[in-house]
Image: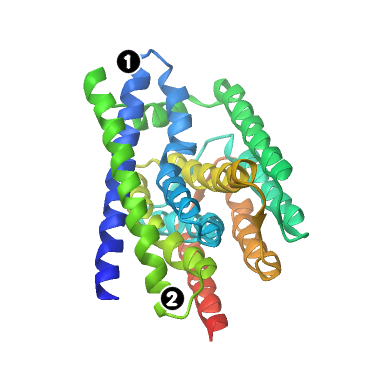
Amino acid sequence: MLESIGWALLGLVLLALGGDSLVKGAAGLGERLRIPRFTVGLGLVAVATSLPELAVNARAVLAGDRALALGNAVGSNIANIGLTLGAAAVAAPLVLRWRALSPLLAALLLATVAVVVFSLDGGLSRLEGILLLLAFVAVAVFTALRADDESPAVRAEVDAFASARGGAGLHLLRLLLAAVLMWLGAGQVVAHLPVIGHALGMDSLVAGLLLVAIGTALPEMAAAVAAARRGQGDIVAGHVIGSSLFNLLVVLGGMAAIGGAVPVPASFVRLELPIAFLFALLLVPLLRGTTTVSRGEGGLLLGALLAWVVLESALLG
């Protein structure tokens, strides 16, 4: 088991390095292609930071472990809100001015409900997966159309996040390196974290829900804490909500649309998916107009995450 812990930690480090290289490479290449920096920033905040998790799920599916991928997708949403946003707010209060955050949160709540409803018959069908993917496209278009409505302060914050130095060759190299690092890192995570989970009495679904989801969230938490200390509260919240939407609509939707029906256990529909909805619901009071997520509210989110981990651990017994 100690060997598996070492390899799993190496995998998480590779994922973190790959994610950082991806953001820098995509930001720099977008600038070289003269794509508006704010547009590039929106994509990076919502999608690019979720690609390491997508790599993990892709490796899990290829390894025939769809339960691990399902658990990771839903568990990551809980970890995004409880761990990433909670820790960032504890590090420094998050000032939120991004007007699109509230409708995106509404979309996240609706997406969670849709996954629950679709799963009532025991799984996600190919057609339901396609509908989830189309919903993500609609959300992306909506966000892009709303871009001009954002304040100069928000635009400056996103522009700063999407800045990168270097020539086109360096940025292409960064993207290639990111792909290699994430693929190798995801392979180590998928190969060894379930071994640790099984030693602790977890099946693949719970291992994905707890170990993989929280493990892959740790680098994102560190980046969010750094962003919070730089005063980039909108970047942190945008990542949390955008990444959660990506997990439900693209990761789960893509699994069903491309790979066929995804089995969803009835116990998962009754407990874990409603808990993911409740975590998203915790954000509603925090996103009413220009507001601040205080350290106390961040502590509340961390406490909710700890309570969830304790609950899941108790159910194992």
Q: Nearer the viewer, residue 53 or 183?
A: 183
The residue where tag 2 is placed is: 198
Please tell me whether mark 1 or mark 2 is closer to you in this view. 2
Q: Is residue 40 above or below residue 309?
A: above
Circle 1/circle 2 CB separation < 8 Å: no
Q: What kind of element bears circle 2?
A: helix
- Expressed as whole percent of the image width and height from the top left, the position of residue 192 reads 35, 65
| Residue 226 can be seen in this image | no
The residue where tag 1 is placed is: 32
Residue type, numbered disc 2: His
Residue type, numbered disc 1: Arg
Q: Which sits earlier in the primary sequence, circle 1 or circle 2? A: 1
C-alpha distance separating marks 1 and 2: 47 Å
Q: Nearer the viewer, residue 158 or 80?
A: 80
Residue 227 left/right relative to 114:
left
Q: What kind of element bears circle 1?
A: helix
Q: Is residue 303 above or below residue 179?
A: below
- Expressed as whole percent of the image width and height from the top left, the position of residue 152 reads 46, 24
Instruction: Name, please, the residue furthest toward the top.
Output: 34
Which residue is at 48% across, 37% downward?
A: 47
